[in-house]
Amino acid sequence: MPKQGHIPCTMPQRRWRQSHDYTGLLIATLVICSWGLHLVWVLHLNFSAIPPISIIGTVLAQAFLNTGLFVTAHDAIHGLVCRHRIINGGVGAFCSAAYAALSYKTLRRSHWLHHRDPMGSFDPDFCDIPDADFWTCYQQFMAQYLGPKQLLTLAAAVLAVSLIGQVSPLNVVLFWCLPLLLSSIQLFYVGTYSPHQQAASRNMQHC
């Protein structure tokens, strides 16, 4: 679970857009539909009938769409998907759950703690292990959000898709599990690890 402390975790008051601009909602809808349709298609691919280069491209494409799904949840946390709070939160909750059975409430709370105390003792995304390498930080980061409940939900989903949907286990691993793993590594590196490393380097230069 994310780090706990006495820092206030109430969400900051944001100015919700008053215009009738539904661009964010349209983009979110496009991302969700693209992710879902592509996932259904790749899960039913005849693995033996496509060349290796196409398999690699398909895996990377699904990883890209997974990343878009999580970014949409992040945008919802910042109130950027829709000016209606209920719709905005609903989209964020759906994208969080569809991405990896994540709790939108936990993501939202942890993200605002991160903004309130970046790289501090209350930042749940910051790896405070001295001289920790990338994989150690990645493991700690994932442990903040992927608990037994999320892992059991993902396992049940994989089992249900394999049995009820009559999908090959190889397709599930190659086109669902692997892209999810690649996406999480990309998101962690670009959104958390690299910015923290750059900030730490700047702080060391100023010492």
Image (cartoon, helix red, strand yellow):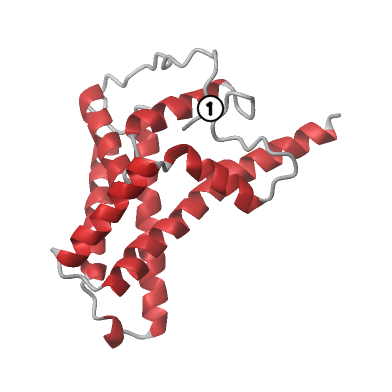
Extreme residue toward the right, this view: 207
Residue name at image x 46 percent, y 32 percent: 1
* Residue 163: quarter of image: bottom left
Residue name at image x 55 percent, y 35 percent: 125
Q: Can the viewer see residue 7?
A: yes
Placement of 206 over or under 51, stated as above or below: above
Extreme residue toward the left, this view: 164
CA neighbours of label 1 inside 10 A, class few (<14), some (14 to 19), many (20+): few
Residue placed under numbered mark 1 in the picture: 3
Position in image of residue 108 (x %, y %) = 40, 28
Residue name at image x 24 percent, y 68 percent: 43
* 83 relative position to 116: left or right: left
Position in image of residue 198 (x %, y %) = 70, 41
Position in image of residue 76 (x %, y %) = 34, 32
Q: How many marks?
A: 1
Position in image of residue 133 (x %, y %) = 68, 50
Q: Can the viewer see residue 84?
A: no
Three-letter code, disc 1: Lys
* 175 or 12, nearer to the observer: 175
